[in-house]
Amino acid sequence: MTESTAQPEPRTKTETVVEQLEQLAQYVRFWNAGTEPEQRRLAATALAEGVEYRAEIGILSGAQALMDFRNQFVAHVGTAALRLRERPQVHHRRARLQWEILTGDGDGASFATGTDVIQFDQDGRISSVIAFLDRAPAGFDAEAHR
């Protein structure tokens, strides 16, 4: 008897795009998660081990660093939610996600807008994020973070 060495069927381009869009939805839910257990669950699903996040505020490595950043931000500004401005664009294991951060208890004041350029690893999880500010928060000094 011979062993089967059958390889799984390769994913189609459409299946890959659908999977990447789902990972991006998980990524948005991660930023909006209100509890640490929920953040950890979403990070395990969407983010690769050692995910790298580059933004004006610095370079963060790993899901815990992103969780800490998000939680410090919310502790400073109060209630905040990340919302998409447009449907994400994906191709060739990369994505562009345009977002807006809304703050306040129900009033939804716009805090900032930006664009994340995201890379997916071979497993389809997010391995790196480069965050650009399209409209910085009032009083933000990019030079202070260099």
Image (spheres, rainbow, N blue to C red):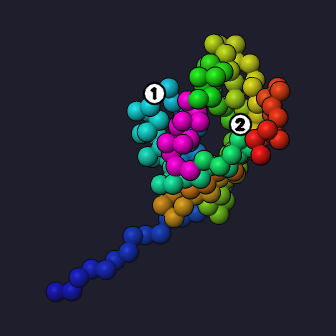
Tag 1: Cα neighbours inside 10 Å, few (<14), some, or many (≥20)?
few
- In the image: residue 23, left or right of residue 9: right
Helix, strand or loop for the magenta stretch, by majority: helix
Measure how far apart labels 1 and 2 are at the Cα level.
21 Å
Q: Residues within 10 Å of mark 2 (few under 14, many from 20)?
A: many
Residues in magenta?
A: 61-71
Residue 62 among magenta residues: yes
Q: Residue at x 50, y 45 (%)?
A: 63
Q: What residue would you read off at disc 2?
A: 99
Q: Residue at x 40, y 33 (%)?
A: 37
Please state which amino acid type lies under the numbered disc 2. Trp
The answer to whether residue 21 is above or below residue 12 is: above
> Looking at the image, is mark 1 or mark 2 earlier in the sequence?
1
Q: Quadrant of residue 97?
A: top right
Is 8 on the left-hand or right-hand side of 96? left
| Residue 39 among magenta residues | no
Amino acid at pointer 1: Thr
Residue 48 rendering spot, x and y as whole percentages: 50, 54
In the image, 29 versus 9, the foreground residue is: 29
Residue at position x 43%, y 70% from top?
9
Q: Label 1: state its secondary structure.
A: loop
Q: At 16% across and 86% down in the image, what residue appears?
A: 1
Q: Which residue is mark 1?
A: 35
User: In the rendering, at what x and y percent does residue 119 appear?
Assistant: 62, 57
* Residue 31 point in image, percent of width and height: 57, 35
Query: Regarding mark 2 in the picture, which secondary structure is present there?
Result: strand
